[in-house]
Image: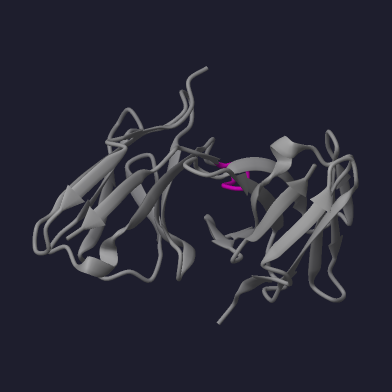
Amino acid sequence: KAGVTQTPRYLIKTRGQQVTLSCSPISGHRSVSWYQQTPGQGLQFLFEYFSETQRNKGNFPGRFSGRQFSNSRSEMNVSTLELGDSALYLCASSRGDIVAEAFFGQGTRLTVV
Amino acid sequence: GESVGLHLPTLSVQEGDNSIINCAYSNSASDYFIWYKQESGKGPQFIIDIRSNMDKRQGQRVTVLLNKTVKHLSLQIAATQPGDSAVYFCAEGSARQLTFGSGTQLTVLP
């Protein structure tokens, strides 16, 4: 079956703009988590959604937000982009009962200039 | 705060040898621990996980050991192959999130 799909793969944005990233989970998976990966900070948890509800949130400013749709697809939005937001944004899906067996997408590489 | 860390940032092994990647964690309340492999340009790939009530689990060519006394986790890869070259992350799972370590770069030498 198809894996986790993230679009777009690459993005270049200007400081101050906003961006929306998309994630389609594995069929049947109801939990979607988002992570930010940078060389300096590693992989950091952003938030997790299950059945359209945010169940958990990491320590990121309010500029980072997300949502999940009834078909489990998820989007994350970053407003007022800063240079430090440049990162690989990863989405992971799991069945929902536990997040241990999370499967990751290839990520969206965001560059802020 | 709670953290998951790795002992070594890089590890080089000869093809065919066994590899051992170590990880220290600090959150004794974690329910499970997971190892991921990340190749260049790809997202992390699930390798194996272990519940906190276990001390060993085996998969195909991989074994994870959990020592709760010293809060230590290790990943053993048998007969390491060139395709095993990647960054390996340990992660702890609790409260519906994963907390990742900083990663170890494994390089397999011919």
Please tell me whether residue A101 belongs to the stretch shown in magenta.
yes
- Percent of width and height locating residue B106: 71, 53
- Percent of width and height locating residue B85: 69, 45
The answer to which quarter of the image holds residue B77 is top right
Image quarter hosting the C terminus of chain B: top right
The answer to which quarter of the image holds residue B9 is bottom right
Q: Is the magenta stretch mostly helix, strand or loop?
A: loop
Colour style of the rendered protein structure: one colour
- Percent of width and height locating residue B3: 60, 74
Identify which residue, B38 or A75, lies in the foreground: B38
Range covered by the magenta-colored residues: A97-102
Identify which residue, B110 or B99, lies in the foreground: B110
Identify which residue, A8 or B49, lies in the foreground: A8
Answer left or right for B63 relative to A29: right
Residue drawn at x 26%, y 71% is: A61
Image quarter hosting the N terminus of chain B: bottom right
User: Which residue ends up furthest to the left in the rendered image?
Assistant: A16
Please tell me whether residue A28 belongs to the stretch shown in magenta.
no
- Percent of width and height locating residue B109: 78, 47
Q: Is residue B73 above or below residue A10?
A: below
Answer left or right for A8 relative to B18: left
Answer left or right for A74 relative to B83: left
Answer left or right for A54 relative to A17: right
Q: In this view, does B61 lie above or below B100?
A: above
Q: In this view, does A80 lie above or below B109?
A: below
Residue drawn at x 22%, y 67% is: A83
Residue drawn at x 19%, y 67% is: A82
Q: Is residue B82 above or below residue B105?
A: above
The answer to which quarter of the image holds residue A52 is top left
Q: How many marks?
A: 0
